[in-house]
Amino acid sequence: NPDLIVAKLGRLHIYTFASEGYRDAYGLPKSLSDLRNHRIVKQHGAQLDETGYARILGLESLEGIIGISTNSSVAVLYAIERGAGIGFLPTSVMALGAPLVAIDLGINYHMDLWLTYHKEFRNSDRHKIVIDWLKKIFDSKTYPCFGDEFIHPNDLVPLMTEQRRYFGLL
């Protein structure tokens, strides 16, 4: 549509995480095939590839290994934090202070975030405030977790110390 402005906001890098409690109780998978022996917290939704988990694990079905399936990313984070299983989350959750353990399984998936709006909103002060705010919160210079290049979650934590302090997370 020629009346739309499309701008890339940033990139979400998806990684495997568990809580320390889960790690202490059940251990962590050492490989993708070992992940089959753990409970998975899975997010589902129209924007997500429903066959991705089984395909990545080389399984025909996920029956018996899904502990929780929800369409809420917040519920996935909460379930993983509480030790309900292992799940896939954006690396930004750990960078901003979620008490999680990154699990290195060789999976580095990403999803780009896009902003689309009608060009007449450029002249609206109230819309411009929101557009500028969205661009600011996903700025990879300020928040390296949203950059195009993958940075391991453990390496993001020190890079985001000032941002965590700004948001009262330290």
Image (cartoon, rainbow, N blue to C red):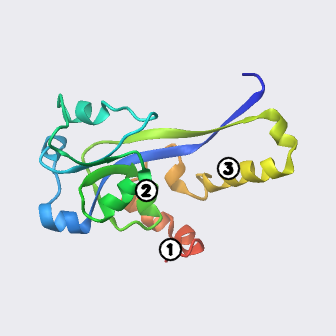
Q: Residue at x 43, y 46 (%)?
A: 13
Question: Which residue position is annotated with label 2?
Answer: 74
Q: Closer to the N terminus: mark 1 or mark 2?
A: 2
Q: Closer to the N terminus: mark 3 or mark 1?
A: 3
| Amino acid type, residue under disc 2 in the picture | Val
Q: Are marks 1 and 2 in contact (CB under 8 Å)?
A: no
Local crowd at mark 3 within 10 Å, few (<14), some, or many (≥20)? Answer: some
Residue situated in front as seen by the camera: 147 or 167: 167
Q: Position of residue 120 (x, y in %)?
A: 84, 36
Local crowd at mark 2 within 10 Å, few (<14), some, or many (≥20)? Answer: few
What is the CA distance from the residue labelled 3 to the residue labelled 2?
A: 22 Å
Q: Nearer the viewer, mark 3 or mark 2?
A: 2
What is the CA distance from the residue labelled 1 to the residue labelled 2?
A: 17 Å
Q: Closer to the N terminus: mark 3 or mark 2?
A: 2
Question: Which residue position is annotated with label 3?
Answer: 135
* Residue 58 in the image: above or below residue 169: above
* In the image: residue 156, left or right of residue 130: left
Q: Position of residue 70 (x, y in %)?
A: 36, 47
Q: Disc 3 on helix, strand or loop?
A: helix
Q: What number is the disc on residue 58?
A: none
Question: Which residue position is annotated with label 1?
Answer: 169
Q: Residue at x 51, y 65 (%)?
A: 160
Q: Residue at x 30, y 55 (%)?
A: 17
What is the CA distance from the residue labelled 3 to the residue labelled 1?
A: 22 Å
* In the image: residue 1, left or right of residue 138: right
Q: Disc 2 on helix, strand or loop?
A: helix
- Residue 137, quarter of the rendered image: bottom right
Res. 51 in view: yes
Res. 156 in view: no
